[in-house]
Image (cartoon, helix red, strand yellow):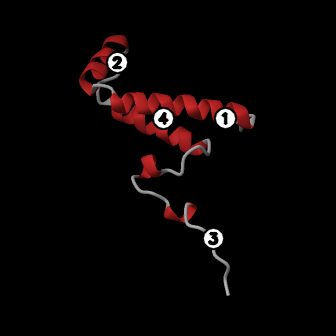
Amino acid sequence: MPDIALEHSDATELAELLTFLADWISSTDAGALADSLTASSPAPATYLTTLHADLQRFVFLLGASDGEDLFGHHNDQLNEPRTARP
């Protein structure tokens, strides 16, 4: 599969959309959302968990996340202030 190049602004916009969808899935009543998904596609309700994880992974791959939501922990190295070495 060939590499696909995205302009930074396009990658940012795509990451924002994917983040919105991931947040919406996690904040919506899972039962109602599963019923809606099952009614509109052949995917089982358990697909929601996979869909949510995929959205988070794409956001991470676009560089818009440190992976905290994806990997379940916070990457403290990204937020530690740099100090001069002696």
Residue for badge 2: 37
Q: Earlier in the sequence, mark 4 or mark 3?
A: 4
Q: Earlier in the sequence, mark 3 or mark 2?
A: 2
Disc marking residue 81:
none
Give the amino acid type for the residue marked by disc 2 in the picture. Answer: Leu
| Front position among marks 1 and 2 | 1
Disc marking residue 82:
3
User: Percent from the top left, x then y, of residue 48?
Assistant: 35, 29
The image shows residue 71, relative to residue 59, as above or below, that is below
The crowding category of the residue bearing disc 2, from other C-alpha atoms within 10 Å (few below 14, some 14 to 19, many at least 20), is: some
Asked whether, in this view, residue 73 is left or right of residue 76, the answer is: left
Q: Residue at x 54, y 46 (%)?
A: 65
| Front position among marks 3 and 2 | 3
**Viewer can see residue 4:** no
User: Percent from the top left, x then y, of residue 76?
Assistant: 49, 63
**SS type, badge 4:** helix
Separation (CA) of disc 1 from disc 2: 27 Å
Residue for badge 4: 55
Give the amino acid type for the residue marked by disc 3 in the picture. Answer: Arg
Residue for badge 1: 11
Give the amino acid type for the residue marked by disc 4 in the picture. Answer: Leu
Q: Decide: marks 1, 4 in contact (CB < 8 A)? A: no
Separation (CA) of disc 4 from disc 3: 31 Å
Looking at the rendered structure, the number of numbered marks drawn on it comes to 4
Which of the pair 43/78 is nearer the observer? 78
Give the amino acid type for the residue marked by disc 1 in the picture. Answer: Ala
Separation (CA) of disc 3 from disc 2: 46 Å
